[in-house]
Image (cartoon, coloured by chain):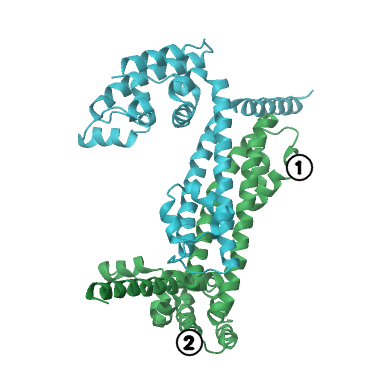
Chain colours: A cyan, B green
Amino acid sequence: MNKKELLNKLYLENLAETKQKVKDSINEDNLIIQTINCIEELTKTVNLNSKRLKEWYGLYNPEKTKEINDNNALARFIVSEKNKEKINDSMGANLKSEDLEEIIALAKHINSTFKLIENYKKYLDTIMTKKCPNLKEIAGYMLGAKLIEHSGSIKKLAMMTASTIQLLGAEKALFRHLKTGSKVPKHGLILQHPLVSNAKQKEKGKIARALADKIAICIRIDYFKGQFIADRLKKELEEKFKN
Amino acid sequence: MNKKELLNKLYLENLAETKQKVKDSINEDNLIIQTINCIEELTKTVNLNSKRLKEWYGLYNPEKTKEINDNNALARFIVSEKNKEKINDSMGANLKSEDLEEIIALAKHINSTFKLIENYKKYLDTIMTKKCPNLKEIAGYMLGAKLIEHSGSIKKLAMMTASTIQLLGAEKALFRHLKTGSKVPKHGLILQHPLVSNAKQKEKGKIARALADKIAICIRIDYFKGQFIADRLKKELEEKFKN
């Protein structure tokens, strides 16, 4: 081989190695992040479409849209045969059946979006159980996935201190505090945990702190493939704050 | 009948009359407005979901997501059997088939959203043809519906001057002009008309003005149930600005 051939061989081998590394860098973290983002986006879209459904169907049957407050339930009602049930002196317009069909088409679409969200929640639950059982046990699969999404990966989350985890998702309030001296935020995403959200206002900070401690422990165990101990930690936490 | 009975009778008759009036106030204008809003919202949601699909499927087959730029085409590709086709040295991860299935589920959802949008466009075209054939001819059914939605009803649009119609949808720029003396906006929604959007920059204002004139005439004819003359007006306009 002459020099040129050698260089060319080196180039090709380097290229192959880089491609392999890119390939290997994609792991289940990415699937968790894609799925939780997808769930949040679908939830946003289904809410937007449900608002439209309520207004549109409300032209025909305003009494019913006032009665049914749940988006999912309203869509199911409109898809069902019962959509023709109207009170006798309804203030709604008498739509032609072809106009009503168009509204039912939107309700069907909303129905299937709700089903897709449910499907993705189950899938996310499965990957979380497999990949980070401790985090899932202590935080729940939705909040756990949001924390991973927010930090960027399981590795990055595992390297964070408890106090950083406590404030993940409250960056805006934190920087406002640093800049203007406004109040220090007490919790970010973990406010969504029932232990925190159901607590009394003045207890929230303390519980958020304790929960963040446990989450930090759990995600490190998961990252280093340790044993399952989150059930014990969860019990401790619940005992401590059961009022 | 005594006085109390009379009053009661009066009340009930009034109530019935009001309910009937509310009922009658809902007409095809409302259907046009709901449909155009629904199309715009579904388009927004399908774009959001498509961005997610591109990122998610890109983990598996980044070369393909780079190749196919059209959202609808990408979703159709992923739903088809061809999603398994990958170039040999792809940088994408080897996803398990159950993980790939979840991505395909999103692509299917996006596909059906695109179909629903198409369906609503046809429906809107039908109502517009029936209710305002002249406006539809001159402006197109999408732009025509947006103008009705923006003004609130066919009646309100019919009462507007051409210069108001020209600036419908550019309210923000108009008030900025009045307040700060910035440039006067030349067009609002009607910029979407191909005659305006395809024109040279310095011609746009003039064409928008002429188009708004014709739209004002057309919507008045439609509102007062006049004859169909929009094809003639459209021809005039096209001849004048054919460069």
- Mark 2: which amino acid? Phe
Q: Secondary structure at mark 1?
A: helix
Residue A160 vs B113, above or below: the answer is above
Pointer 2 residue: B224
- Mark 1: which amino acid? Glu
Residue B49 vs A59, above or below: the answer is above
Q: Marks 2 and 1, how far apart in space?
A: 54 Å
In the rendered image, is residue A45 in sight? no
Q: Are marks 2 and 1 on the same chain?
A: yes
Of A48 and A157, the residue lying toward us: A48
Q: Position of residue B159 (x, y in %)?
A: 39, 82
Instruction: Point out the tag, 2 or 1, that comes first from the N-terminus.
Output: 1
Instruction: Identify the residue shown where x is 61% and y is 57%.
Output: B116
Q: Which mark is residue B81?
A: 1
Q: Quadrant of residue A173?
A: top left
Q: Is residue B160 left or right of residue A93?
A: left
Report crowding for label 1: few under 14, some 14 to 19, many 20 or more residues within 10 A (C-alpha): few
Of A82 and B214, the residue lying toward us: A82
Q: Position of residue B162 (x, y in %)?
A: 41, 82
Q: Secondary structure at mark 2?
A: loop
Instruction: Identify the residue shown where x is 46% and y is 31%.
Output: A146
Report crowding for label 2: few under 14, some 14 to 19, many 20 or more residues within 10 A (C-alpha): few
